[in-house]
Amino acid sequence: MHQWSARARGWWQHPAFGRGVREMMSVSPGLAAWGLMTGVAMVKSGMSTIEAVAMSLLVFAGSSQLAAMPLIAAGAPVWVILTTSFCVNLRFVVFSAHMRPYLMHLPLRWRLFHGYLTVDLSYVLFTRHYPHPSSDGAERREQLAYLSGGSLLNWVSWQSASLLGIALANVIPTHWGLGFAGILALLGVGCSLASSPLRRVSAGVAGMAAVVAYALPLKLNIVVAIASAVALCLIIEETRPKTPAATP
Amino acid sequence: MEGTDLWTLAVIVGLALVTVITRCFFFMSNQPWHLPHWAQRGLQYAPIAALAAVVAPEVVIAHGQLIGTWQDARIYAALTGAAYFFWRKGQGQAVLGTIVSGMAVYLPLHLGLGW
């Protein structure tokens, strides 16, 4: 218990914690609008208030929730619902491979804690800020403080907006399309990652592949898009003449 | 707003487990394990690919099909948002500006003109 609180205090006090919070702050309006509409959608799909609140607080995964709602409403078999959610979440499996070297020095419960809270934007902002994992104690603390700040602000803005959406479900019309602000938040962060020619290639290929493969079930188009974009970038990397910047 | 049923709550707990398992997939086990070198290099292209893969269909697909019209508020909102970002060269609150400028184009077109 003592060790636990010492660790938690360390995170709060580190300047990187505030930096993580601030950088997440600039995308939080989009997140909030998206969370709000997810909350509205849960109630509109026929869930009771308790079910919607439980889903928001426990599942904490917008796209997986949106995919599961119609299936729950239709009384689909449990394995179909869980498989759908797993496939919609497959991009997180890719992220977890990336996050592994940053987190492996922690005990399991802290890895699970960070993993559970690491959603698209916290992962993207974190790996943008810290492209390389560290083996140095002070640097690791800084990285974790940054990750925690971003993750916690993300959790608070998502959950409060989602709960507000559940409460106001019958007042906010879905046809306003406020959820599009969430897409714009992802777009803005995507633009901030477009820092090298190959990354722009990756974005273009993935965007097109996701549209072309849209008819695939279980949102597998997203996984196909990531795989084809990464594969193509690796092939281009291998075949083009090496520049000093390209060699690690 | 009918009653709450246990089956749905059980499914919700199952979905929460799926969240934990997928987000922690490669760091749940303590076994020493290293990503192959090519995969490590490939991962630097994954975040932007994931975002593009999520965003692109949300902008150009409606009712499961590629839209066949230019009268769609999402296209202009996304273009405006991206243009704002690159005009500001990503400095300051550029992402916030992307959201605000995009919605400033989206809402009038969508609610006013029905695009």
Image (cartoon, rainbow, N blue to C red):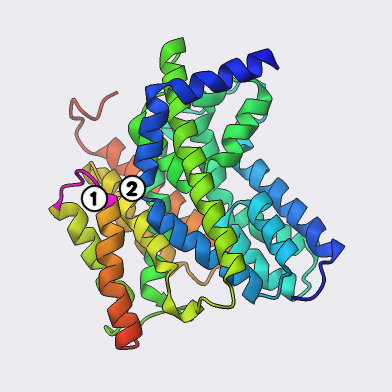
Picture residue at 33% right of the left edge, 49% below the top: A189
Q: Which mark is residue A21?
A: none
Q: Picture coordinates of residue A219 (x, y %)?
A: 55, 63
**For mark 2, does the 10 Å Cα neighbourhood hold few (<14), some (14 to 19), or many (20 or more) residues?**
many
**Closer to the camera in the image, A1 or A85:** A1
Q: Quadrant of residue A52?
A: bottom right
Q: Picture coordinates of residue A203 (x, y %)?
A: 32, 53
Quadrant in which the N terminus of chain B is drawn: bottom right
Q: Quadrant of residue A136?
A: top left
With respect to residue A75, does A150 lie above or below? above
Picture residue at 22% right of the left edge, 38% below the top: A240
Q: Can the viewer see residue B41 in this picture?
A: no
Labels 2 and 1 in the same subunit: no
**Closer to the camera in the image, B42 or A113:** A113
**For mark 1, does the 10 Å Cα neighbourhood hold few (<14), some (14 to 19), or many (20 or more) residues?**
many
Which amino acid type is marked by label 2? Answer: Ser
Q: Picture coordinates of residue A18 (x, y %)?
A: 39, 31
Q: Which mark is residue A26?
A: 2
Quadrant in which the C terminus of chain B is drawn: bottom left
Q: Which residue is mark 1?
A: B94
Picture residue at 66% right of the left edge, 65% below the top: A68
Tag 2 near tag 1, CB within 8 Å? yes
The chain letter under disc 2 is A
Could you tell whether B10 is left or right of A97 in the image?
Answer: right
Task: Considering the whole magenta stretch, tell me its main secondary structure.
Answer: loop
Q: Picture coordinates of residue A112 (x, y %)?
A: 64, 33
Would you say residue A108 sits in the magenta stretch? no
- Magenta segment boundaries in residue numbering: B88-95
